[in-house]
Amino acid sequence: MQQHQSLKEHYKFTKEEALILKELQPRMEELSNRFIEEFYDYIWGFGSTAKFLKNQKIIDYHREKIKAWFVNLFCGKYDLEYFTYLYKIGEIHVRIGLPTHYVNSAFTFVRTFIIKNLHENCENDRRSMMEIEAVEKIIDINLDTLTSSYREEELGKFLSLSKVEKTILSGLKRFNSYVNFFLAGSLALVAFFAIGLFGYDIYLLFFTDIGIEKGILTVLGSLLVLWAAIELIHEEINHLQGKGFAIGAFIMLAMAALIRKVLIYSLSSESGKELLIIGAVIVALAVAYWLVGAKRVVGVSTNKADSAFSS
């Protein structure tokens, strides 16, 4: 763990500032209930909070711990014990797989909440500036300590590799990035052809004797394929930005293509057997899509949330 004394020196955090924070503690303790209510309103806006706070018991425990951390932010005694406490919180965040983005965003709320209150209760400009400066430093120190767990875990994993393993890993990462960009380009090409397919179906609808009913169903099927291709491109962009591989999007594209066939075959009396086979495949793909989504959500919430908020 990073030495707490050197960390405070790097932030130029003084004993006088620690005393200022200690003097603010009674006021912040009075605000703690309001803080926790607004904090929860804020983090629920992340959209994925339920993955980590899956039931009321965990939520109540987490609220209690966050409230205690908030009051303790103004304890005035920032020694090894305090930094060990912060580091353990950071280790829990790493263990449950909580993205650093959520941590950074939550700290933005904490900073805004405190500074807003200080401004509202400002009686002396000079004193207010000293309070704000002390608060800014202790918040940054907390954030630095919490996120250091992420850096140390990544560094530890990399340093444990041999020179050959590091070379192979670096090469594979470069190759993987090239493949991902190639895949993104290929998907763009697929979307381009899907647009062409849609245009061709429009042509058949208006300039051939395909029939109005079959023509409309064919056009709808083409639109479905185009929509799935666009969704797949969106997921690949997310993947390039560091998010997980969206196998579900590929399943969705396959389902869209098969549904298009069903729409076309539904008007034919000679395609009953093919239609039955395609229908069975679509059902199998739908089950696979559901299992992929269920595994992603349930896996995170059941295996990680308990360890985060019950330890």
Image (cartoon, grey):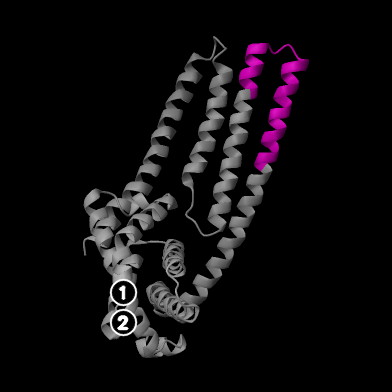
Residue 183, position as x, y percentages in the image: 61, 51
176 or 16: nearer the viewer: 16
| Magenta residues (range) | 190-219
Are the residues flagged by discs 2 and 1 in contact, CB closer than 8 Å? yes
The secondary structure type at the circle numbered 2 is loop
The answer to whether 275 is drawn above or below residue 160 in the figure is above
Indicate whether residue 54 is drawn in magenta: no
Q: Amino acid at mark 2?
A: Gly
164 or 195: nearer the viewer: 195
- Total marks in image: 2
Q: Quadrant of residue 173?
A: bottom right
Residue 310, position as x, y percentages in the image: 21, 61
- First of labels 2, 1 by sequence position: 1
Mark 1 lies on residue: 25
Point out the image quarter for the N terminus: bottom left
Q: Residue furthest top?
A: 269
Q: Amino acid at mark 1?
A: Gln
What type of secondary structure mainly makes up the magenta span?
A: helix
Q: Quadrant of residue 228?
A: top right
Residue 257, position as x, y percentages in the image: 56, 31
Q: Quadrant of residue 176?
A: bottom right
The secondary structure type at the circle numbered 1 is helix
Numbered circle sitting on residue 105: none
The answer to whether 132 is drawn above or below residue 294 in the figure is below
